[in-house]
Amino acid sequence: MDVTVLRPEELTPADLGSWRAMQRADPALANPFLAPEFTRAVGHQRPAATVARLTAPGPEGPRTLGFFPFERHALGWGKPIGSGFNDYQGLIHEPGLVWDPAELLRACDLAIWEYDHLAPGQTPFETAGTRRTRAASPIMELNGDHGTYLDRLHPKFLKTARQKERKLTREVGPVRLVFHASEDRLLNTLIRWKSAQLRAKRRRDLLSRQWFQAILRELLGVPSESCSGTLSVLYAGEQPVSIRYELRSRQVLAGWFPAYDTRFARYSPGTLLYLKLAEAAADRGIAHIDLGKGDETYKDDLKTADLTVTEGYVDRRTPRAALCRAQSASGRTARAVVRANPAVHRAVVHAANAVDRLR
């Protein structure tokens, strides 16, 4: 196996075609976070973004076996492409491919590769990985049948949601969903709502960064079956009450940034949007909506199954890798200390957001 390391913009049309064909051939790789469009959009904004192309000799020339998108940082510390906002990670490959993680890292000049949302089916990484922990990633199974999905939800949850929808209709206006809205003003509204929500929860506000907003705008409405940014809006009358930015492929709708107008919180507009979205997605042939890992109550209410994603790392057992492991361990310890002290946590988040705004 030969490995060629490229910048995302160096991928050729033939590379993009091979990449998309691999995604179509394996449902486990159909998530839009694994698509070349996502990798290229990140590459336009993050200098560390890189792609390894895996090939093997063939009778008619080199045959492409896979693509490994990653970011290379100091000391050869590797992370997934879009680290910090990529909810599905791994190597995109031909069906049945087996690879040696240590050899792949060596060819990419990586000492270590850390992941926190490793996709199911990445067996070589799983087998060679260290400090592996698994987490549930809830999904809403649709498979083109909205009625069957609703039948699997708890009757009490569904009854309450319908009561709130009727109340919202009476008091504000008829409820309707726009599956994809392309207006820039609505994206700006989502960013404003979500930023306020993150700041209120004392969490770091990624959406305040101009480079990240550039990624959102680049992906929004991309005419691709592999990855296209979709902005879904729930209206009550003419008033947008909930907005959700997701990434869409032919089979998967991957949630990314949901937000709602807090003035309408008593109607649970976020939940109403998800329920409307399930019907619209099923009509478009979407197999499932990925809610992303996390234990939020609304995910438990809406999900019908769980995928399993993994957090851990693979390394080459070199001095550089040992340094990376030590830094990672000290970072985890520091984060645990910060999280355990609310006052310190608020100060750290406040400082980080201030730096983001200055940038």
Image (cartoon, grey):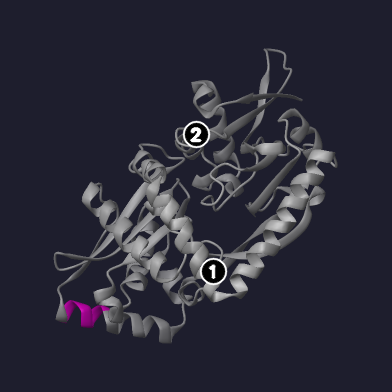
Q: Residue at x 65, y 36 (%)?
A: 93
Up/down of 138 relative to 48, above or below: below
Up/down of 300 relative to 179, above or below: below
- Where does label 2 land, which residue? 43
Q: Report the quarter where the C terminus lies.
A: top left
x and y percentages locating residue 290 in the rendered image: 50, 59
Task: Give the extent of the magenta segment.
Answer: 165-170
User: Are there few (<14), some (14-19), or many (20+) residues within 10 Å of tag 2?
Assistant: many
Q: Are marks 2 and 1 in contact (CB under 8 Å)?
A: no
x and y percentages locating residue 17 in the rendered image: 52, 27
- Determine if residue 186 is in view: yes
Mark 2 is on which residue type?
Gly
CA gap between label 2 and label 1 equals 31 Å
x and y percentages locating residue 274 in the rendered image: 37, 67
- Determine if residue 143 is in view: no
For this view, does 275 lie left or right of residue 324?
left
Q: Residue at x 42, y 48 (%)?
A: 248
Q: Secondary structure at mark 1?
A: helix
Q: Nearer the viewer, residue 251 or 221?
A: 221
Q: Main secondary structure of the magenta part?
A: helix
- Where does label 1 land, which residue? 345
Q: Residue at x 72, y 17 (%)?
A: 58
Residue projecting furthest to the bottom: 156
**Disc assigned to residue 22:** none
Q: Quadrant of residue 56?
A: top right
Q: Nearer the viewer, residue 7 or 346?
A: 346
